[in-house]
Amino acid sequence: MNVFASILTIASWEVRKTLGTMGRSVLPLAVVLFLILIAVTGFTAQTGLHLQDGMYTAGVDDPDLADVIGSDPRFRIYQATPAALYQERESYDVIIIGGDVYAPDTGKGRAAVKALRTDYDRYKNIVYSQQQDLFAAYPLWIDVQDIKSELDFVATQSGTRVAAPSRSRSPPVPEGPVAEIEAPDSGVDIPVEDLRTGLLESQDSDSEIYRYTDVFGQESPFGTFKTPHQLSPPLPFDSIILIFVFIFPLYFTSQFFMMSVMNERLERRGEILLSTPLSPWTIIAGKALPYFAGMIAITLVLTLWVGQSLSLILPILPVILFFLASALIIGMVSRSFKELSFISIFFSTVATSYLFFPTIFANVHVISLVSPLTLVILEIQGEAFTVSQYFYSTSLFFLTSAVLLYVGVKNFKEERLFSHAGLLTRIREFVSEGISRSHPYISVFAITALTVPFVFMVQMMLLVLFFNLPMPLSLLLLIVSAAFVEEVAKSIGL
């Protein structure tokens, strides 16, 4: 039997074993949870997000003010006389008496005032949009052209110091006679009434997400032309949600591979495969093949479902390999399912942070290319990525996956799989397996070289965390943290 036939045979055994186990216990529960997920998703799509409904209690003395904030479901509004409101002020998160706002100096009180300010700004924009002279209400229109910033540590040295303007207690007075002038050209090739209609529609169609964060601005119906109120960072929120739909089932599938490896160890079923003349990498390849094929199939289905090019699979491929390689190592080092759960949760937290956090800056900064998912966002937005960008985003994932798979293959033997030593002891045993007695110095050098991708990965994550801080603090923290990571890696003997 050749190697490929052996891999396919083990893969077919793995499929039958997994489906048999799921059929008895996991599959019915998974179907129920999937149906609940569909029901909850449909209900949320129909009714929207209501996480903050009725969170704040507001008291007003004017029915017109109640109408201003009445459309915001975050507020429960009560109308009373000024005396009654002041007497019962401790029962409210915010009160409005005679046009003045009062709130307790608490976290909830300050949050209520912030929400009230958002509603008032929205009300002002609606009033401005209804003015006869629209360009008097909106004198500034901005043609937004997004460009990606680059790291430039000497940019501040090319500037000049500007003196602060002198302060004056009185408003400026024109020196010459005041005369009427013709209104300047708007510079916007859109009829005024269309502008007015678009502004009103943008106010009415505000996404519920804007209620929960002030990071996002309103969407402009006029393309690149925006008012200052509509300015916001070009955050690819929709694309990030879409790639989460890709990544979640892939990581969930890798968990089955992790549990399969764990079952082989706890129930000692792996002894049967280890007693065969098959090599460890053949056994691992056969066991991982069904999950790898399933993850590729999931990616293909989702790619076709969202109408994207099949090239979307390219940046997701290293993520799939990284999930499978990590699942193999976690399944091999864990002594129990309790320890497996702890390690896998820690891994998922770190991995998702590394994958998703840089994508927030996909349209802002080149540093977002640290994550392969940024390439997915660019592909979804219709922007092709280059070979150099692909290499920059995926090389660390390919390298770390190869190292983890190599460690798993070297330690896929009876004395390692069925050991009950502690976690740190097992990690040392796994690393020591790569040391050759005949070539110890070369082995130590190779092991040290194999840890470099992991050190780079940690440093890249620190770069993403610190680069947005003001200079020179960001540069200082980056240098200190990078040196700290390197010294820690060297101090543990690697």
Image (tube, rainbow, N blue to C red):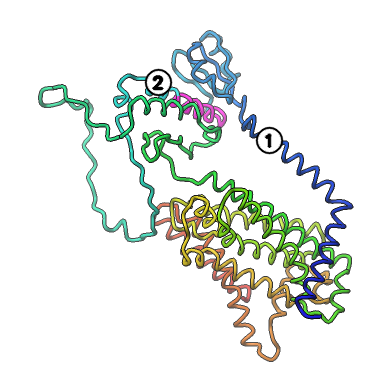
In the image, the segment drawn in magenta is 106-122
Question: What secondary structure is found at the residue carrying circle 2?
Answer: helix
Question: Position of 49 compared to 472: left or right?
Answer: right
Q: Is residue 110 magenta?
A: yes
Amino acid beneath label 2: Val
Q: Residues within 10 Å of mark 1 (few under 14, many from 20)?
A: few
Residue 287 falls within the magenta-colored stretch: no
Rendered location of residue 237, percent (x, y): 53, 44
Q: Which mark is residue 127?
A: 2
Q: Which mark is residue 42?
A: 1
Q: Single out the mark in the foreground, 1 or 2.
A: 1
Question: Measuring 46% from the left and 54% from the top, which residue is drawn there?
Answer: 383
Please, what secondary structure does the residue beneath circle 1 have? helix
- Percent of width and height locating residue 116: 50, 25
Above/below status of 98 relative to 369: above
Which residue shows up at 51% across the image and 64% down it? 390
